[in-house]
Image (cartoon, rainbow, N blue to C red):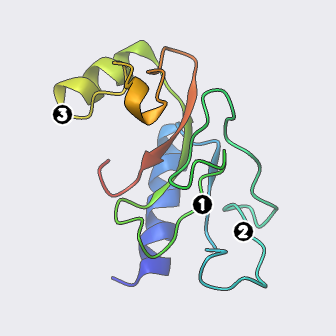
Amino acid sequence: MSHRLFIKVAAAICLSIGIIASIACYNKYNNKDMETKNVLGTKLKMCCSDPVTGYYRDGHCNTGPTDYGTHIVCARVTQKFLEYSKNQGNDLITPLPAYNFPGLKAGDKWCLCISRW
């Protein structure tokens, strides 16, 4: 499956389950002249700056050639999701000061790795 088709399929799934705030369909790191857009074709908005999210820690759910997890879904996380994620081996609750990661709590927004979910 092509990367672009994978993103479109993932976008449809995420929209159907209501966890999405935005998905980056276009990768500004592949084409610097192309504006990063969401699935609606409008400019990709910031997901969250407190805590700062995104693979590139720029607050946006941008992706690029080194982002093997494709962190393109901006979601407002719930406690149930955080506990499920931790049980699956992806602990987003525990702070990691060495990485300037405060840990997430219910209500925070975070760029999720689409290929994981």
Query: What is the distance, in whole Å, between disc 2 and disc 3 at their CAs?
Result: 30 Å
Residue 110, image x and y in percent?
A: 53, 36
Helix or strand or loop: what does disc 2 sit on? loop
Q: Are marks 1 and 2 in contact (CB under 8 Å)?
A: yes
Locate residue 52 relative to residue 35 in the image: left or right: left
Query: What is the distance, in whole Å, between disc 1 and disc 3 at their CAs?
Result: 23 Å
Type of amino acid at the residue the image marks with label 2: Thr
Residue 14, image x and y in percent?
A: 49, 48
Label 2 Cα crowd, 10 Å radius (few <14 / some 14-19 / many 20+): many
Query: What is the distance, in whole Å, between disc 1 and disc 2 at their CAs?
Result: 8 Å
The residue lying toward the viewer, choosing from 13 and 89, is 89
Does label 1 or label 3 sit earlier along the sequence? 1
Label 3 Cα crowd, 10 Å radius (few <14 / some 14-19 / many 20+): few
Q: Which residue is mark 2?
A: 36
Residue 45, image x and y in percent?
A: 77, 50
- Residue 89, which numbered label? 3
